Image (cartoon, rainbow, N blue to C red):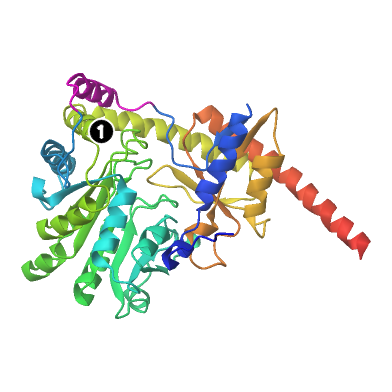
Amino acid sequence: MFEPKFAERSKLLKPSSIRQMMAIAKELLAQGKTVYELNIGQPDIPCIPEFVDGIMRKAESRQINYTPYNGETYLRETYARYLNSYFDRRGVDHLVIDTENILVCAGASHCLSNIFLTICNPGDEVLTIEPFFSPYQGFLAIAGGVLKAIPTEAENDFALPSNEVIESYITEKTKAILINTPNNPSGRIMSYEELERLARLCVEHDIYLISDEVYREMIIGDEEAVSVLQIDLHDDELNEKLINRMIVVDSASKTFSLCGVRIGFVISLQPIVNTIALVNAHTVACISDIMQYGVASCYDAVMWRPEYIEEFRGIYRERLEATMEAIHRYLPKCIVSRPKGAFYVMIKFPELEDVNEFCHYTLEHFNMGGETVALTPAKNFYLDPKLGKNEVRIALVVSPEKMKRSIQIVSQSLKSYKRYKANIDSHMRQLL
């Protein structure tokens, strides 16, 4: 019998807990069951209407063509204007971004994969901060790189540790520090002081600072996000060195409810952008013509209609309030930190040793009135196997009423699960 032979790198790629729970949830939905899919960051909010208008105008031309491998000029120009206006509206100093500083990719995930393929040789290391977006490991593995994680503590609001701790993780193999602010899964926003410390460390150790800022507009607290594009080291020579080591990633997915469109951006110095663009050219060849047109319409729209951003922020704030209220009411023993950005909430279950089994039990074996909930076990957001074992991440992707209902279902499932485990333990004792 023929046995397929695969490259060693393929053995490093494993489905994330997010996708595993998603597959089970979709199967249950296909069976006609009601599942609140809080396991994945797929907003239920309709996409911005200008996207539909834009792609319809493009479709009417009946010309859907190949595009430049670095992205259509009109999209790169529009995105650069949007990004500069984002900072200017808030009255903060920032690096001025021009068209040649922008590369268009097939979503933020593709941006990161391209970046790692560009800067990493096999065995090179990239540092990130725990908890982190779990697919980072796979993106880096494809390039032959190794992800290393710097731990933080929920009890300390996931604050960045001291420079001494961070430097203890930097080796001769370290190529970059990768951050995500606002953070998925914790919702934490890094402070200016923290970003400045990281910037100085990257300059000192001659490594890249990669900033994943796809949730920059997703603010659900009172504090705006800080971008690495705002960092000033107050020294012309140091600032020049930082600019040569800074790479920012952004996406249209969350801001405009366009997760399936797959348009992301790399923002960096022109020589860096041009080199990463070559990976684009030799992997996907180019990015969708019609999708770029639609996304350009979205960024153009929010520059003259900025209230759109405040409207969707308001929607997620309402969901957060409902969720926090429900957690305190139905899950009083759980520990939860209030997120400031993105649209996720981390919940710790002190009563459980391993929440993975509980998540599967809730989704596959429990329902309340024919309804159940898909949760994401948080252990994949950590490299340390001891961390995240009793934590879950939920996404604020359904209405406030459904968020409350979901937490109520989780509460009842927890009671059922504990009875189930107690019965198994009792049965095992009888057998012994």
The disc labelled 1 sits on which kind of residue? Met
Q: Nearer the viewer, residue 219 or 274?
A: 274
**Left or right, 176 with reference to 24:** left
Residue appearing at x 65%, y 58% in the figure: 354
Q: Secondary structure at mark 1?
A: helix
The N terminus lies in quadrant = bottom right
Where is residue 358 shown, x and y percent of the image? 67, 50
Q: Nearer the viewer, residue 224 or 371?
A: 371
User: Would residue 62 be counted in the magenta stretch?
Assistant: yes
Where is residue 266 shown, x and y percent of the image? 22, 51
Against 308, residue 250 (above or below) is below
Which residue has dot 1 on it? Answer: 291
Q: Quadrant of residue 134?
A: bottom left
Where is residue 234 shown, x and y percent of the image? 11, 65
Bounds of the magenta segment: 46-63
The C terminus lies in quadrant = bottom right
Q: Quadrant of residue 389?
A: bottom right
User: Would residue 40 be counted in the magenta stretch?
Assistant: no
Residue appearing at x 22%, y 44% in the figure: 286
Q: Nearer the viewer, residue 287 or 25?
A: 287
Look at the magenta stretch and give its main secondary structure: helix
How many marks can you see?
1
Residue 317 visible in rendering? yes
Against 166, residue 374 (above or below) is above
Against 271, residue 311 (above or below) is above
| Residue at the extreme front | 1
Where is residue 252 shown, x and y percent of the image? 28, 39
| Residue at the extreme left | 236
